[in-house]
Amino acid sequence: MGLSRRTFNALAGTTALGLALGGSGALTCAYAAQTVPTGPPPGTPGADGRGHTIGFDHYSLVVDGRRLVVWSGEMHPFRLPSPSLWRDVLQKMRAHGYNTVSIYVSWNYHSPAPGHYDFTGIRDLDLFLRMASETGLYVILRPGPYINAEIDGGGFPGWLTATEGRARTADPAYLSHVDEWLTRVNAIVARHLYTKGGGTVLLYQIENEYDAYVTDPAGRDYMAHLYRKVRADGIDVPLFHNDKGRNGYWVPGSFDTGGETGRWLYGFDGYPSPTLAPPDWGHFGAGGVKGGATASPRTPGFVPEFGGGWFDPWGGAWFDGKGYAESRRLRDAAYERRFYLTNLANGITLHSVYMTFGGTSWGWLPAPVVYTSYDYGAAIDEGRQPTAKLIPMHQLGHLLRHIPDFAKLDRAPDVEANAAADGLKAYHLTNPDTGAHVYVLRNDGDVPVASGLPLHGAGLPVPVAVPAQDARLLAAGIRLGRRKLRYSNAQPMLALTAGRQEIAVLTGRSGEETVTALECASEPTVTVLEGEAEQSYADGLLRVEAQLDGMTRVLVSGGGTSTPLLLLLADDETSVRLWPHDTPSGPVLVYGPALLRTAAVDGPSVGLTGDTIEAADLEVWGPRGIHELTWNERELKAHATSSGSLRAAQPLAGAGAVALPALTNGWLRKTENPESAPAFDDSSWTPAEKTTTHSTTPVPAGQPVLFADDYSFHYGDVWYRGRFTDATGAESVSLAYSTGTQGLLMAWLDGRPLGTHRMPVPDNKTVRKGSWADTAVFSVPEELRTDEPHVLSVLVRRMQHDQDGKTQDTHKVARGLTAVTFTGAAPQVSWRLQGEAAPDPVRGPQNNGGLYGERNGWHLPGYGDGGWEAVQLPRADRRQGVTWYRTSFRLAVDAGTDASVGLVLDDDPARAYRVQIFLNGWNMGQYINDVGPQHTFVLPNGILHTRGANTLALAVLSDGTTPSGPSDVRLTLLGAAAGGVPVAPVASPGRST
Ligand code: IPT
């Protein structure tokens, strides 16, 4: 492998923090381009206890001396609060061709208070990393400290909003907190590094789209500090940062890495408009592009985030109220082909799609800019259901895993002359080691294009067709096992050896005419085993022509090669029923079911696990001698086929029916907000006595600090009670307050409702630009303008802290009341406030705000609701304040069925109320009836007991201007499969009183 010729940019010296490297000798390094020939990629990674090297040259990563194309997708463990289901998503990713999962780790999710960190239960990062390695996926780890991610404060803990120091700079006060966080995360990550064989952590990101102080010492020192800190914590995999675009920010050498070179990658994110032509990033870019691949010529093309959907704001303005279905439609499978193939053509060999599974911003996790669902329009939807967007990911992922030529491509002479005239954009690349040619053909127009293209080695132009707004990849001169594919106008998906034969899969849209030309020294024997195909042989070339329709099977034997080749021509829908899986005994290829999770070979026996939705045939190709088959641990009768496979005698059963109870009965109701009554005892509340703050919001002259964060109330609702002795002459009271978008304030004077004020939403299209501060002005009822003690009670629904994308400490903008003034009088008001109680030790700091019911466990299972009023839905109450509804229901889903269940709320959209949904005490999100667009809330199994009892509690906040629901509340089935993963119940401690 020419180790001696590596450019071994060894680590020079140690840093002030003391650079610690593992003793395995598994250093990362940069390679000279010529020293790594194209060969098979590294095998499926796992925690194998062995040392591994992770290096790179400008083509690709080089892992253990072999080229690796990273085909990654993003998911957030914190957006799926049921650890068992992490495995479900990871297995779906692996099965559909991803080799890597990219995750953020969100500081605020793990730290309820300074010095307090929680990595247990739903926060068990160690468990996640173990599952990733058991699934055979590499991990790209992104712990911030700032992550953005449409999460509260961009991932900064609530408590950080009340600390000194400019965040995201080298400010020492900020860095001291950062170091505490990184120490805790890195202690876990260090156990899972691929370099040490402890796990599969391959790459590690510091900061996130950091573009504020790029040329400023405060920024450079910050990045240098993060780099050295992470190294000092024993993280020895390559580090990188994700530039917000192709700006060339934070390329190697742009900050002090303590003398280390060759262990820092440049990455840039891309979220191009799906309605414009995909941009070239640098490899193919026009001269003068300062960023992109050209910004960092010695590192491989790396896109740590490429748009795989997009998020949706409250009100659904960006998708015209159609929600994530529209997000998914705008970035559909054809978008993926057009944009991701363009990325490959541009030399991107580390490619991560943000998001692949978006999940749920449950509780108070969402940043103000998004609602509860973070489905994102991703390839796997919020209910964990695979979508049609997995088709291109599956085809390309398996291609990159199985056919090595794509890891090292140079630009080759244009074939434009023949293509452009027909409206095709054609990228032509070649692998300098193997001589393979690769073509990416893209049709940006609105009509399908059929053209003739001079594929390398084809002689005459080969007919190619690209549908409107679509793209495809073609290859010429790649190896399919021992044979060579001269060319094909179908897209290759994989080639593998299964026992005595080789198998190659080529794909395309259903109905397309394909021609596939294989080099054969002599005339082979060709048998069409299934479907229809024409074949001809001349001049050492076998041509197979077939129209794509399901699966066409053509067996090629002889022809100068002793091992037969089974050619499978599969249309798109069929291709995602073909599941290659590596086992220690060799590859297997499974055909039929809706998902293959695991495959194991033990002598003659193949054990498979996976899912079916409909009844499905099961067929498997694998190592020699296999003749026994199990599916989800059940033995199946199986027989050998003429295709060289083993086929189950009976089809696998599909998912059975899932019955969900109606939620029409058993509702109990209780109103709350005793805080609005003058006699309420607030002596245990926190007096608002501070006069200074670290918030960016100025403290109004002559007033105390009222900002909730300054009194350690960071999440959800906050109550204020102000006492004053004289209201003589008071005409009105002005309550200035600050929330995220869709926040509101309601006030009572001496128990009398003054009204509700909603934070104005200036313009839905520019929803992110609002400052989210406004003033509610209420007139003081004449009869209360008296010279006696008064109590002003105010409830503020905060909608979380802003993100800090521009490094302006915007997470420190005040939340809650900011100033209170009267007209006609100037009473001295003494304030006390109360937000959330101590964080739920299991559900965490973002589960609850400061409503009376939340502080007293009304949301919890087992709460003594015996004295509550029995009611029927729908409701139409008119009341300013908080009303709770509780019911319980039982589910009895079959043990072998993975049912994904959602809760639907629906009502007349004119009704002004909102609901926090608590399932078994877990805050599953917020429904705003008159804002939307979300009506369906995913209830993750584990929190949802699919075989047993569940408690549902709804905390309804209504402003009294309209009748208020809840009205229609029901369960809905989001998908069901026979199979699934074992689901452990998520701890849901209740209330014994
Ligand atoms: C990029 C962030 O890195 C990521 O955290 C997330 O916020 C994503 O965008 C949008 O969902 S920021 C970039 C689009 C400016």
Image (spheres, rainbow, N blue to C red):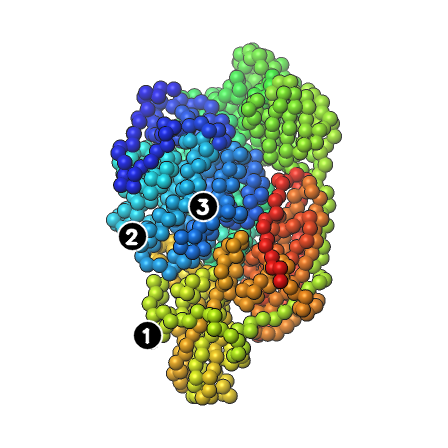
Query: Is residue 943 in view?
Result: yes
- Sequence-wise, which precedes: disc 3 or disc 1? 3
Can you tell which mark lies on residue 172? 2
User: What is the distance, in whole Å, between disc 3 and disc 1 at their CAs?
Assistant: 41 Å
In the image, is residue 615 above or below residue 167? above
The residue type indicated by label 2 comes to Pro
Q: Which residue is mark 3?
A: 104
Residue 726 percent across, percent down from the top left: 43, 86
Image quadrant holding the C terminus, namely bottom right
In the image, is residue 761 above or below residue 470? below
Can you tell which mark lies on residue 701? 1
Residue 229 percent across, percent down from the top left: 33, 43
* Ligand 1 within 8 Å of the CB at mark 3: yes
Residue 2 percent across, percent down from the top left: 35, 19
In the image, is residue 754 above or below residue 895? below
- Sequence-wise, which precedes: disc 3 or disc 2? 3
- Residue nearest the observer in this picture, 450 or 392: 392
Element type at marker 2? helix
- Residue nearest the observer in this picture, 22 or 255: 22
Query: Is residue 643 in view?
Result: no
- Residue nearest the observer in this picture, 365 or 13: 13
User: What is the distance, in whole Å, between disc 3 and disc 2 at their CAs?
Assistant: 24 Å
Q: Residues within 10 Å of mark 3 (few under 14, many from 20)?
A: many
Question: In screen coordinates, is 942 left or right of 291?
Answer: right
Q: Nearer the viewer, mark 2 or mark 1?
A: 2
